[in-house]
Amino acid sequence: MKAFRAAILRFADDGTAVYEQDGLLVTGPGANGQEVVHAVGPHAAVAANHPGVPVEQLPGRIIAPGFIDLHIHFPQTDVIGSPAEGLLPWLEDYTFPHESRFADEAHAAERATFFVDELLRHGVTTALAFGTSHPESVDALLGEAQRRGMRMIAGKVLQDRHCPDGVRDQTQQSLVDTEALIARWHGRGRLGYAITPRFAPSCSEAQLRGAGELAAQYPDVWIQSHVAENLDEVAWVRQLFPAARSYLAVYQQFGLMRERAVYAHCIHLDDEDRALMHDSGAAAAVCPTSNLFLGSGFFDYAAAKRAGFRYGLASDVGGGTSFSPFHTMLAAYYAGREGRTKAGLSLSPQELWWQHTAGAAAVLGLQGVVGNLQPGCEADFVVLDPAATPLLARKTAHAASLDELLFSLVVLGDDRVIERAVIAGGA
Ligand SMILES: [Zn+2]
C-alpha cells in the first residue's frame, strides 16, 4: 500500500463534491490485483488507521479523479483545428482523407502512442473512443492502452454508405470484424469494446440491424454513435428514414438504444426523444467545444435535467478544439448560459467537474469503478497544481470557497495544471 497527502477532491453519490484541504489517499491492490482506493479522508484520521504506509507528500497540490472523455475520435488527432464550412464539408475535406490512412498498422500505431500521451498529458485517464472503419485502428489504440494499463473503450466505425473509398466498409464484413474485435478486446484487463455506427446516414439498414443484433447478443458491450448534431444532418436523416418519427428513433428502431449506449451531441432533440433517452437508459456525450467550433447548436441542459436522462462531457476531438477537460468544462458553461435557443442556466463548478468524472463514469455504467476516489474505485487520479500560472496562483490563493477554487481552474486551467496522471494499471 502507499499513500498520497494533498488536498483531495472526490464526489458523493448525489454528485456533490467532497473536499479535504489536508487529505490522505491510500491505495493498494484490490481483489483482482488492480490498484484501488483503500481509504480516503482527512489526513489525521486516515493516517492513524494506516501506520507504516509510506506517504508521498504533495504540498500545495490537489488530487482529483482522472478525467473521463465520453466521445473522442482517436484518428482525428491531426484533424483538430481544420477550417471548414460546417460538419458535412469538414467530414469530406479533412476527416475522411485522414481516416483512410489508418488501414496501415504502422501509421495507426504511431498515432495511438501520440494520442494516449496527449490524453494523459491533459489528465484524461479513460476515454470512449471512435477508431476508423479499419479494425487495425482499434488494435492499435487498445493495444497502446493495454501497455499503459488504462481503462479504455473503443470501437471500429461502421459506415457502409455515403462515404468515400478507403473508409467505407462492407456490410457483412464490418459485422464479422466487429464481433472479432469484441472477442479480442472486450473485458480483457481494463479494456472494453463499443459497437460504433458512425451515424445513421453512413449506415445501411442492414448494417444498423446487424449492429443492433450484436448489441443484443453482447449486452455489456458499449454502443457509441452521433445524433442530432446539426440541422442539415437532421434533415438528411429525415430523407433517408422517412418512416422514422425522429433521428433518435432510427437508433431505437434498430435496437441501438439501451444502457451503455452513448450518443454524442443530442442537440436537436424534442421532449419525446428525451423521454426515449431516459426510458432506454441511453446517455448523451455533450461536446461543447465541438458544437461551438462547428456552430452546431447548444445542448439543452434544462430539458435534459427535466427528462432525467444521463449525460457527461466529451471533447469530440477533432471536431472539438482541445483535449483539455478544462477547456471542455468552460465551453459547457458557455453552452449552459446560452439563453436564446433554449433556457439558459449557470452550471455550478462542482457539476461541471462531476460531468467530466463521476458523472461520466455513470454514463458508462462504471460508477464506483472510475471517475471518483471513493474506497473501492480504481486508483486513476490526477495531481493538479492550482498555482500553475501566475494568474491561477493569485486566483486560487484567494478562493473563499470550493466553488471559487474549482471555477478558477475551470476558467483558467489547461494542461499546465496537470502535474501528473496516475494510472491504476501501472504506467
Ligand atoms: Zn464525434
Image (spheres, rainbow, N blue to C red):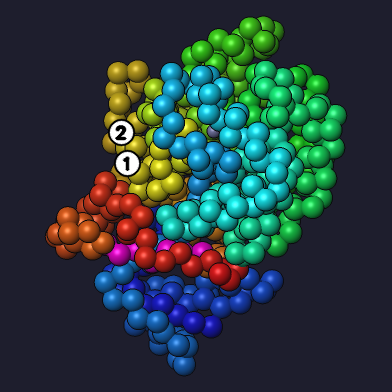
419 relative position to 308: left or right:
left
365 relative position to 81: left or right:
right
Residue wearing tag 2:
334
Q: Is residue 111 visible?
A: yes
Q: What whole-number distance in Å separates the C-alpha atoms at marks 1 and 2? A: 7 Å
Q: Position of residue 376 (x, y in %)?
A: 56, 68
Query: Looking at this view, is 173 or 251 the one in front?
Result: 173
Q: Are marks 1 and 2 in contact (CB under 8 Å)?
A: yes
Kindly identify the amino acid type of the residue bearing the numbered disc 2: Tyr
414 lies above or below 46: above
Secondary structure beneath dot 2 equals helix
370 lies above or below 69: below
Q: Position of residue 83 (x, y in %)?
A: 41, 27
- At a point 51% along the width and 19% down the height, the residue shown is 89
- At a point 62% along the width and 35% down the height, the residue shown is 99
> Is residue 385 covered in magenta?
yes
Secondary structure beneath dot 1 equals helix
Q: Position of residue 192 (x, y in %)?
A: 68, 51
Residue stretch rendered in magenta on the structure: 380-386
186 lies above or below 266: below
Q: Is residue 308 visible?
A: no
Image quadrant assignment for residue 402? bottom left
Mark drawn on residue 330: 1
Query: Looking at this view, is 357 or 290 the one in front?
Result: 290
- At a point 68% along the width and 11% down the height, the residue shown is 241
**Quadrant where the C terminus lies?**
bottom right
> Is residue 74 covered in magenta?
no
